[in-house]
């Protein structure tokens, strides 16, 4: 991306607070979704111990192409998932939002929508990007529906993009939201 990746920061919304991911979040994160095959189905091998999840978090935190956030449920003060800004080499003035997961207890709640509003608002208003990219496994229809709900426009499928945890090839569905499209989507989401 030609826009500057942000320094770690805190973003606050009604349902969640996004704060820089640290090793201190791992115990809550493991309680939220560690060992749950369905949570990890489309991303990584399922972490079956706190140490495995800690290793995954450390890799994400140390990766200069990611700015990871712990998703803190304001109601409880506990971490219930994580999400990241991801650098997008080869795309001018773009940033990706991804490497997102939430514990099952917060699926179909305001958590995902609130996170995306916070991240997309910050990307357009403070990072100077003109496009936010999101992507998911072509078979992950739940994620695709969520991306469409927030305003993601299908942009294509990258075939055999990467291997899934089970070793099969993943085709990746790409979506984008442009800066001029976002205000109408944001208003619609806030009405809900």
Image (tube, grey):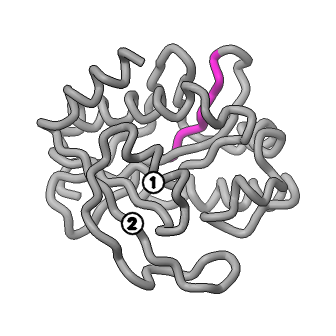
Q: Look at the numbered discs 2 and 1 and tell me whether their residues touch, using CB distance below 8 Å.
A: yes
Residue drawn at the location 50% of the way across and 61% of the way down: 63
Residue drawn at the location 61% of the way across and 62% of the way down: 59
Residue drawn at the location 23% of the way across and 31% of the way down: 126
On screen, residue 33 above or below 126: below
Residue 12: give its label: none
How packed mark 1 is, by other alpha carbons closer than 10 Å (few <14, some 14-19, many 20 or more), is many
How packed mark 2 is, by other alpha carbons closer than 10 Å (few <14, some 14-19, many 20 or more), is many
Magenta segment, prevailing SS (helix, strand or loop): strand
Residue 73 part of the magenta-drawn span: yes
Mark 2 or mark 1: name the one nearer the start of the chain: 1
On screen, residue 29 above or below 34: above
On screen, residue 79 above or below 33: above
| Along the line of sight, the residue nearer the viewer: 176 or 149 | 149
Spatial distance from mark 2 to mark 1, Cα to Cα? Answer: 8 Å
State which quarter of the image contains the N terminus: bottom left
Lateral position of residue 180 relative to residue 22, left or right: left
| Along the line of sight, the residue nearer the viewer: 8 or 46 | 46
Residue 144 percent coordinates (x, y): 45, 54
Residue 107 part of the magenta-drawn span: no
Q: Which residues are magenta?
A: 68-74
Residue 143 percent coordinates (x, y): 51, 52
| Along the line of sight, the residue nearer the viewer: 180 or 48 | 180
Residue tagged 1: 144
Residue 182 percent coordinates (x, y): 22, 33
Lateral position of residue 52 relative to residue 168, left or right: right
Residue tagged 2: 173
């Amino acid at each position: 991306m030609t826009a500057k990746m942000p320094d770690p920061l805190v973003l606050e919304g009604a349902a969640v607070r996004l704060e820089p991911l640290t090793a201190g979040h791992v115990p809550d994160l493991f309680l939220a979704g560690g060992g749950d095959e369905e949570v990890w189905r489309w991303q990584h091998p399922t972490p079956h111990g706190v140490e495995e999840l800690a290793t995954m978090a450390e890799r994400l935190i140390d990766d200069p192409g990611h700015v990871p956030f712990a998703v803190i449920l304001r109601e409880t003060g506990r971490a219930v998932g994580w999400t990241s800004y991801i650098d997008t080499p080869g795309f001018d003035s773009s940033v990706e939002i991804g490497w997102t997961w939430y514990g099952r207890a917060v699926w179909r709640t305001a958590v995902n929508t609130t996170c995306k509003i916070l991240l997309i608002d910050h990307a357009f208003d403070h990072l100077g990007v003109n496009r936010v990219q999101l992507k998911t496994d072509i078979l992950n229809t739940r994620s695709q529906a969520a991306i469409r709900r927030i305003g993601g426009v299908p942009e294509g499928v990258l075939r055999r993009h990467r291997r899934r945890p089970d070793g099969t090839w993943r085709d990746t569905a790409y979506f984008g939201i442009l800066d001029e499209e976002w205000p109408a989507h944001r208003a619609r989401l806030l009405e809900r």
